[in-house]
Amino acid sequence: MPGRSNVARLVQVGTSLYAFLANILDQPHGNPLQVHGRRLANLVGYCARMKALCWQGWPEQATTAAQGAGTPAPGSP
C-alpha cells in the first residue's frame, strides 16, 4: 500500500489531469481537439467519474454562493 505522501501525489495528479481534460472536453465552443477527445470513451468516462466525485452539487453550491455574495444567481434577471 502506498504511503500517505504517495496517495496525496496520486490525488494531485488525478485532479490535475481532470482539470486539463475538462478544459478541453467541456468548453462551450468546439474545436478539433475537443471533437477527437469526446470520441475517446476512456477520457469521457474519466472526466464523468472525476466530476461526480469532486464536484457533487456544483450548480447548487455556485448558485448559493452567488446569492450569498449579493450577486444574481445564474439565469436570474
Image (cartoon, rainbow, N blue to C red):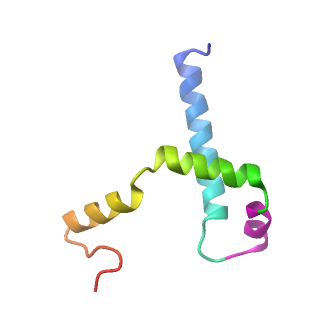
Is 17 drawn above or below residue 59 in the view shown? above
Q: Is residue 63 magenta?
A: no
Q: Is residue 36 magenta?
A: yes
Is 8 drawn above or below residue 36 in the view shown? above
Q: Residue at x 56, y 34 (%)?
A: 11
Is 48 drawn above or below residue 75 in the view shown? above
> Residue 60's x, y, as percent?
34, 60
Q: Quadrant of the C terminus?
A: bottom left
> To which quarter of the image does residue 22 belong?
bottom right
Residue interval drawn in magenta: 30-38
Left or right placement of residue 48 versus residue 44 in this view: left
Q: Residue at x 67, y 63 (%)?
A: 24
Left or right placement of residue 24 versus residue 75 in this view: right
Q: Residue at x 78, y 56 (%)?
A: 40
Left or right placement of residue 52 versus residue 36 in this view: left
Is 73 drawn above or below residue 5 in the view shown? below
